[in-house]
Structures are given as C-alpha cells and as structure tokens.
Amino acid sequence: MKEKLLLRVSSAQFAMHELRLFLDTHPDNKEALTMLEKYKSKYTELKKEYEEQFGPLTLNGVNSDEWLKDPWPWD
C-alpha cells in the first residue's frame, strides 16, 4: 500500500513537472493549464493522504525528528 501510494504521488508530481515545461513554450494553452490545475489538486490530495498514513515526505520548513522514531531497517 505504501509503495503504491508513493508511486501515485510521484506520478502526479511528474505530470505537473512535464506540464510546466510544456507551458514554458505554450503559455496560452488552456487545455494544459486546466490539466496542470487538475494534477496540482490530485498531487495535494495524494500527498496529504500519504503523509497522514506514513509521515511527511519533505521537511517543508519544519525540523522534525519523527523519522527517528520509526524502526530502522535492521530493527
């Protein structure tokens, strides 16, 4: 479940990145802008779901030692 959800987060993030690159050369493309907003929303939703279940993906300016509480691979 964790890997599958992380893959979905990564896929949405990749789609946003590719759409941003496309929009660099096609800034007035309404369809691409609509798709970018769709993937931004999906990414935010999936990231929130992942972080609620498995902890933060990034620090986002918060210095936390929560990761130290998880079991280490050799534990």
Image (spheres, grey):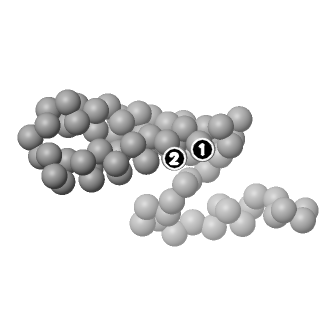
**Residue 33 placed where, x, y %?**
20, 37
From the viewer's perspective, tell me whether residue 17 is left or right of residue 29: right
**Residue 6 placed where, x, y %?**
60, 44
Dot 2 corresponds to which residue?
Answer: 10
Circles 1, 2 touching at the beta carbon (< 8 Å): yes
Q: Which quadrant would residue 7 be assigned to in this image? A: top right
Residue drawn 49% across the image and 42% down it? 11
Residue placed most toward the observer, 41 or 11: 11
What crowding class fits label 1: few (fewer than 14 Cα within 10 Å), some (14-19), or many (20 or more)?
some
Dot 1 corresponds to which residue?
Answer: 6
Residue drawn 71% across the image and 35% down it? 1
Residue 48 in sight from this viewpoint: no
What crowding class fits label 2: few (fewer than 14 Cα within 10 Å), some (14-19), or many (20 or more)?
some
Residue drawn 20% across the image and 30% down it? 31
From the viewer's perspective, tell me whether residue 74 is left or right of residue 42: right
Instruction: Identify the residue at the far left of this view.
Output: 28
Residue 56 in sight from this viewpoint: yes
Q: Which quadrant would residue 3 be assigned to in this image? A: top right
Which secondary structure, mark 2?
helix
